[in-house]
Each structure stands twice: as structure tokens, then as C-alpha cells.
Amino acid sequence: MNRKRIYEILSNNRENDTLSKGFGIFIVTLIGLNVIALILESVTSIHNKAPEIFRIFEYISVIIFTIEYILRIWSCVENPKYASPVKGRLRFSATPMALIDLLAILPFYLPFTGIDLRFLRILRMMRIMRIAKLGRYSQSIQTLNQVISAKKEQLICIVFILFLLLIISSSLLYYTENEAQPDKFSSIPASMWWAITTLTTVGYGDMCPVTAFGKVLAAIIAVLGIGMFALPTGVIGAGFMEEINQNPKTMTCPHCGKEIQS
């Protein structure tokens, strides 16, 4: 099997390719089993009953994922974007999906770090968007990318305003509550935790104002937080409507066979 054929199987860019579809189903199933194993392994009672099974499954999975990663790096030069043998492979290895592939196997080869990074295998679930035949789902992701790209200036402006609101809120509460609660509102960075939980309407209750002026400010900030987080929702929602209107769907009439725009 030559390099081009391997690239076609791995990238699933050839229609009606049974081998490519079968490989996609196999990888998705293996990813799902890895996530299930990772969850079950965290339960001590289950892990203690069959630790060897989890270990063997880990070895088999890492071997398969490693071979897949190496083959992807080796065959990526078949794509014109990564045609250069060295630079092309380096560019491909720096793409988000290739980095996720690497993070999925790297923890196994770096046990000496002392950090349990096995949970990063869950990120491999993102591969479903690329190798599974979920056309509608994939189209939705593409539409979301187009909306975010079209509205990036407005979204960046909203993020900047939210950042300013965070700074102002934490500063006001620090100067208002520091004397009454020096242990909780000890500094502006410490007050940022309260500002974040309030602006996001989470409000854990571990930090709250006790002075009258602090409570008034907190109420105003909470209301502003609701309004500010509604802004990006409105921008993205409007972007979706514009995208849908620009690309209307077409249907075929079952009686006359003519195309109908919806």
C-alpha cells in the first residue's frame, strides 16, 4: 500500500471508500472505549478488580494511536498544503488536530514527569468531527466558524468591555470591602474572583460584600453582568441568521421535481 493510499484512508477524502469508512468507525470506537475505560478506571473498586485488563487495553490503544500518528505525519505530504518533506510535516504536526493526536499518546511515554495526563485522551473525541460521516454536524461546525470569523471584531470588542468591567468591579469592591473583610478582599487580584463569579451569575457565596455601599455596588455589577453576557449571544445569533439567509437550503418538490428554496 503506497503513501497516497494511506493518506486517503486516514483523511477520508475519497468518496465511497469502504476501507476509509471502516477505519474511521474503528478509530471512533476505540476512542469511545478509551474514554469509558478512563472513567471506569477512576473508580477504585472497579479498577482493583481487573487492573491488568486496563493496563493491557492501555498498551494496545497507545500502540494503535502511535502508529496512526506516525502514518499521518508520514503521509501528510500528499496534501499540497504540506508538500515539503520537512517543512510540510512540521507545519502539519503543529495543526490543532495533530497536536491533539500527540497529546493523546505523549502521557504514556512521559511517565517520569509524575503528572497524570491520561485525561487528555478525551480530546481525541474531537476527531469524530473529522473522520465520522456526520455531514450535518460537520456543516454546523463550519457555519459556526464562519459566523465567528464574520463577527470577530464585535466579539473582540465585547471581550475588551468585559475585561474592563472585571477590572472596575474588582477595584470598586476592594476599596469598599477591604476594611470590613481584609481576609477575603485582601487585594484587587483576590477581588477578581468575586467579580468573575458575580459577572457570570454563578455566585458561589464564598465571597460577598457586607457593607451597605458594597451591596449596592454588587447589585449593579450583577445586573451589568447579565446584560454583558447577553451581548455575545445576540451577536452570534444574528450572525447565524445572516449566514442562513445568505445560504438558503434547497429542496426538491416530490411532485414536479423542481428545486424549492426554504
Image (tube, rainbow, N blue to C red):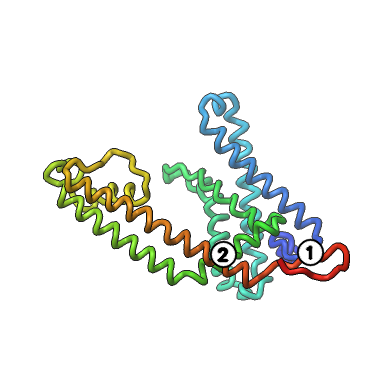
Q: Which residue is mark 1?
A: 15
Position of 238 relative to 185 (above/below): below
Circle 1 residues within 10 Å: few <14, some 14–19, many ≥20? few
- Is label 2 in contact with label 1 (beta carbons under 8 Å)? no
- Side of 147 relative to 179 (left or right): right
Extreme-right residue of the structure = 255
Q: Residue at x 56, y 64 (%)?
A: 240
Q: Amino acid at mark 2?
A: Phe
Residue drawn at x 43%, y 43% as measured from the top left: 115
Give the amino acid at mark 1: Glu
At numbered mark 2, what does the secondary structure look like: helix, strand or loop? helix
Quadrant assignment, res 129: bottom right
Q: Is residue 136 left or right of residue 125?
A: right
Quadrant containing the N terminus is bottom right
Quadrant the C terminus occupies: bottom right
Q: Earlier in the sequence, mark 2 or mark 1?
A: 1
Which quadrant holds residue 39?
A: top right
> Can residue 216 be seen by looking at this rendering?
yes
Residue 86 point in image, percent of width and height = 57, 72
The residue that mark 2 highlights is 240
At a point 53% along the width and 24% down the height, the residue shown is 45
Q: Position of residue 186 (x, y in %)?
A: 17, 46
Say few, some or many: other residues with alpha carbon within 10 Å of mark 2 (under 14 / 14 to 19 / 20 or more): some
Residue closest to the far left = 179
**Which disc is residue 125 wearing?**
none
- In the rendering, at what x and y percent does residue 78 appear? 68, 71
Callout 1: helix, strand or loop?
loop
Give 143 or 242, whichever is nearer the viewer: 242
